[in-house]
């Protein structure tokens, strides 16, 4: 009741981890450190990809897009989570909740498609090396990136609208730490089976179709890699694909477990854990996966630490 008395009737109350208050301080520290790492890692990838001429290729163009996505992804949720973990109020305004829902869905939808495009880029580079500069020319890459972002935001408009228009009959207490589709649908005071079916279909199309394309693409890539005679070239091709596959696995596993089943079947704790994973853990790990497994990026980061690098980029 003390939360209700301090918050507007239009605000949503995010319970988060208030049922385990002893967890709030450790989680605040963990989330803050993870957010700082995500900022540092993703901004570093974006800067070196844009400024280092040796990373001027379609692969790193899409990697920088992924870093921008992850940077925006964490920024849309983590600051509010940190405020709620340390402050007495566990609230978010109605407008803030709708904006958070829309942005988070848009970025997640965009990442689904972007990961499929990145797989196609690896297919073109490994299976069609002679035609690669023509297939992945600069203009086409820009068009593909713009189309990816527009598709993600268009899908978010549909899913967010279907979620927000469901009447809640005054219910505003969410057992979650940010505004997400499953948590908001649980507040609805009507039968949500139609909403859940529509959202599950959209989720399946957006998640399973790109994932199927990615897996199919990697079948052709594996066949092409096995035909490479040079062990060094084969290992290099495998290494560039391994980073992307690891990112795909981290993202799709948690996203599918959340969105390709009825929200009414979720357990609160499981939903929170999965949301933490794809909302914080994955965006934090992605830049380090690409950095630690990629010699070109590591070399570019080392060059970025030298004075000569910044003199040349002026």
Image: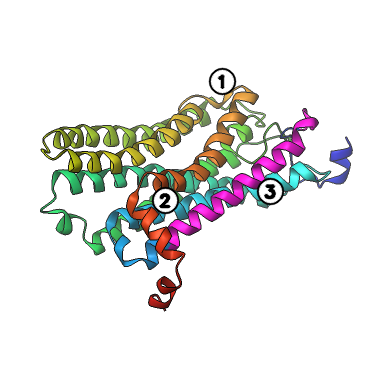
Position in image of residue 280 (x %, y %) = 56, 41
Question: Measuring 48% from the left and 48% from the top, which residue is drawn there?
Answer: 106
Give the residue number, with chain letter if any, for mark 3: 80
- The dot on residue 66 is 2
Q: Would residue 65 appear left or right of 42 to someone viewing this image? A: left
Q: Main secondary structure of the magenta part?
A: helix
C-alpha span from label 2 to label 1: 31 Å
**One can see residue 156 in this view:** no
Q: Is residue 23 magenta?
A: yes
Q: Would residue 156 appear left or right of 61 to someone viewing this image? A: right
Seen from the viewer's position, the closer of residues 269 and 163 is 269
* Nearer the camera: disc 1 or disc 3: 3
Position in image of residue 166 (x %, y %) = 61, 36
Position in image of residue 115 (x %, y %) = 35, 43
Q: Residues within 10 Å of mark 1 (few under 14, many from 20)?
A: few
Q: Residues within 10 Å of mark 2 (few under 14, many from 20)?
A: many
Q: Would residue 290 appear left or right of 271 to someone viewing this image? A: left
Seen from the viewer's position, the closer of residues 65 and 157 is 65
C-alpha span from label 1 to label 3: 26 Å
Position in image of residue 68 (x %, y %) = 46, 55
Give the residue number, with chain letter if any, for mark 1: 265
Q: Over which residues does the magenta segment extend?
A: 18-47
The earlier-in-sequence mark between 3 and 2 is 2
């Amino acid at each position: 009741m003390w939360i209700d008395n301090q918050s507007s009737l239009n605000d949503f109350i995010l319970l988060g981890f208030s049922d385990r208050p002893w967890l709030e301080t450790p989680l605040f520290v963990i989330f803050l450190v993870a957010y700082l790492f995500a900022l540092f890692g993703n901004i570093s990838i974006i800067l070196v990809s844009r400024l280092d001429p040796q990373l001027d290729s379609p692969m790193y163009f899409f990697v920088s897009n992924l870093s921008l996505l992850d940077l925006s992804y964490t920024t849309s949720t983590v600051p509010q989570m940190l405020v709620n973990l340390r402050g007495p109020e566990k609230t978010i305004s109605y407008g803030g909740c709708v904006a958070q829902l829309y942005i988070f869905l848009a970025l997640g939808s965009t990442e689904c498609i972007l990961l499929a495009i990145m797989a196609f880029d690896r297919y073109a580079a490994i299976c069609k090396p002679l035609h690669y500069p023509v297939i992945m020319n600069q203009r086409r890459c820009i068009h593909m990136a713009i189309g990816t972002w527009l598709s993600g935001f268009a899908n978010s408009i549909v899913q967010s609208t279907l979620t927000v228009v469901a009447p809640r009959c005054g219910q505003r207490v969410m057992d979650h730490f940010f505004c997400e589709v499953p948590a908001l649908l649980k507040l609805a005071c009507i039968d949500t089976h139609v909403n859940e079916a529509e959202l599950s279909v959209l989720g399946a199309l957006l998640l399973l179709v790109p994932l199927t394309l990615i897996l199919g693409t990697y079948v052709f890539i594996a066949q092409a890699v096995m035909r490479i005679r040079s062990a060094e070239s084969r290992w290099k091709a495998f290494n560039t694909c391994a980073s992307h596959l690891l990112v795909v696995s981290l993202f799709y596993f948690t996203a599918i477990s959340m969105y390709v089943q009825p929200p009414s079947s979720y357990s609160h704790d499981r939903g929170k854990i999965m949301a933490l994973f794809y909302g914080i853990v994955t965006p934090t790990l992605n830049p380090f996966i690409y950095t630690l497994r990629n010699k070109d990026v590591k070399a570019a980061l080392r060059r970025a630490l030298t004075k000569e690098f910044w003199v040349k980029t002026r």
